[in-house]
Image (spheres, rainbow, N blue to C red):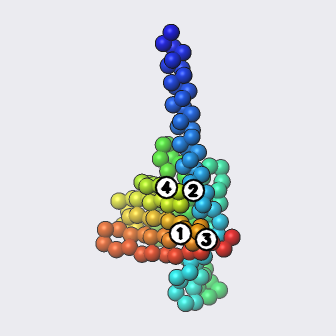
Amino acid sequence: MKRPLYFAHFILTLLMHLETMQAQEFSLEWLAGTWQRIDEKPGRLSFEKWELNAGKLTGMGWTMTGQDTSFVEILALLPVDNDWFYEATVAHNEGAVRFKIEEQSEGYFMAENKQHDFPRFIRYQLVPGGSEMKVTIGDDQRSIDFKFVKIE
C-alpha cells in the first residue's frame, strides 16, 4: 500500500524539479541576441552576442578599436550538476573561468567566483522595457558598469 504513495510522491517531486529547471532556462532567454555597448570610449565599439543552444546560452564579447579587434571573450551560461554557471574564456587567463550563479530572477542574474582576482562578481540586469541592460563587474573594493542596447 505504501509503494503507490511513494511512487506518486516521486513523480510529483520529479515534475516540480523539471518545472523549476524550465523556469530557470526560460528566465535567461532575455539575454539572447546582439547587444552593443553604449558607454564605450570614443573610437571603440564593443558588443556581446548570445545564442540559446541546447539548453544553455553561448556567447561572445568583442571590442573593435578602429578596424582592429582589440578584445575577445567566449562566454557561456550553462548548467553543471544542479547549479548554473557563467563561464568566460579570455586570452589573459589559463582556460575558462567559472562564476556560480548565486542570484537569478526574470531579467537579472548575479554570478560569483570569490577565488578569481578580478572580477569576483558579474551582474547582468535587464532595464525595464527590455531593450537595454546593465552589466556590472567588481569585487569588494570597486565595480565597473557597462551599458548595452539590444541591436538584434
Earlier in the chain: of badge 2 and badge 1, it is: 2
- Quarter location, residue 116: bottom left
> Which residue, given by chain and number where applicable, does mark 3 sit on?
131
- The residue tagged with tag 4: helix, strand or loop? strand
- Looking at the picture, how far across and down is residue 75, in whole percent? 56, 62
**Mark number displayed over residue 127:** 1
Kindly check if marks 3 and 1 are in contact, taking CB atoms under 8 A apart as contact.
yes
Q: Which residue is mark 4?
A: 105
Cα–Cα gap, marks 3 and 2: 15 Å
Nearer to us in this view, 91 or 104: 104
- The residue lying toward the viewer, choosing from 110 and 8, is 8
Q: CA distance from mark 2 to mark 1?
A: 14 Å
Q: Which residue is mark 2?
A: 28
- Amino acid, disc 3: Ser
The three-letter amino acid code for the residue at tag 2 is Leu
Q: Position of residue 58 (x, y in %)?
A: 61, 59
